[in-house]
Image (cartoon, rainbow, N blue to C red):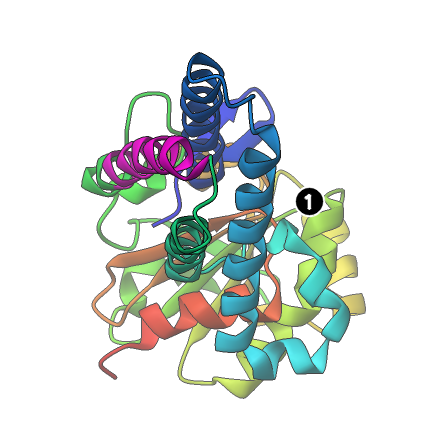
Amino acid sequence: MERTLALGPLALPWSMLLLMLAWLLGSLLHEGLARRRGLGAGMHHSWLMLLAILLAARVGYVLAFAREYAAAPWGVLDVRDGGWSPWWGLSMAISYLLFLWASTNRWRATVSVGTLAALALWGSGWLWLHQGPPAGVEPPATALADLPDWQGDALDGSVLALSALKGQPVVLNFWATWCPPCRREMPVLLQASREQPQVRFLWINQGEDKFKAGRYAQQQGLPAGSVLLDADSTLSHGLGLRALPTTLFYDAQGRLVAARVGELSAATLAERLRLATAGR
């Protein structure tokens, strides 16, 4: 489940912050030890390993969702979608160390110490993030195990209660017309809703009136019965959501299984839909 650190209007993913902290620790330790041993800082290894890990993690993710990226190849370069494979990155780190030892590189010991320290920090942080919402983390939505007890007015005039949707996977997308990432991801969500009719997709507009939300929804071809109005942002405030777009994924039992703060690509959407539809 993705967790973010809220800094005013910004929502930063803890996973990326954790990686940067781990890299900083490992780099400082490696370079400090290298200087003490008279080897020189060896800073190039700090940067080379980071770049190699990021590249491997991205390649692994792209290969896992090759079909989605094939439909939009330029998306491979757009790393804002958060598509990374940590196990590919870990494999690259191990491979890098093995290469240094096999080539008897003079920095092999200091790089190894720094890498092990970074991995220890990253591993403990990963466990910490997955045990529950840490202090300062803002999506309280992750603390809600079930579909919220909320009902909203749809653009077609109907009233829909979220709790009544248990029995099928549900995707809640929180958006607004003034939000550029919301607009960019809209076609991806709409296409997925057409390809996976067993999943209920709902677009919950934040803080706007029926006319403004309805006009934009009509332009985008969104089904009127699936666009709900949260004019006073009661639902998003109750969930503790701070950033748009935010998308929540629930399985057929109504349990929250994934969340995405920020723009979705076809690949990152497919990844989370797998979690929501698992077991069906």
For this rendering, which residue is in front, 15 or 96?
96
- Image-quadrant location for residue 186: bottom right
Find residue 170 and report its horizontal and vertical position in percent: 38, 67
Relative height, residue 148 to residue 158 (above, below): above
Badge 1 amino acid: Asp
Residue 25 in the image: above or below residue 52:
above
Which residue of the protein is positioned furthest toward the top in this rendering? 36
Give the camera-side residue of 128 and 228: 128
| Magenta-tinted stretch | 107-126
Quick check: is 115 in the magenta stretch?
yes
Tell which of 267 and 221 is nearer to you. 267
- Name above or below for residue 39 compared with residue 64: above
Near-viewer residue (256 or 219) = 256
Drawn side of residue 269 relative to residue 93, left or right: right
- Whole-percent x and y of residue 263? 62, 52
Q: Is residue 5 magenta?
A: no
* Residue at horizontal 47 percent and vertical 85 percent from the top: 197
Which residue has dot 1 on it?
209
In the rendered image, residue 58, in percent from the top left (x then y), is placed at 56, 60
Above or below, comparing residue 124 to residue 182 in the picture: above
Write the residue at 71% across / 66% down.
75
Q: Position of residue 274 (x, y in %)?
A: 37, 74
The answer to whether residue 3 is left or right of residue 79 is left
Q: Splitting the image into 4 quarters, where does residue 166 fall?
A: bottom left
Image point (50%, 64%), residue name: 202
Q: Which secondary structure type mostly characterizes the magenta part of the structure?
A: helix
Quadrant placement of the C terminus: bottom left
Mark yes or no: residue 232 visible. Answer: no
User: Is residue 20 visible to us here?
Assistant: yes
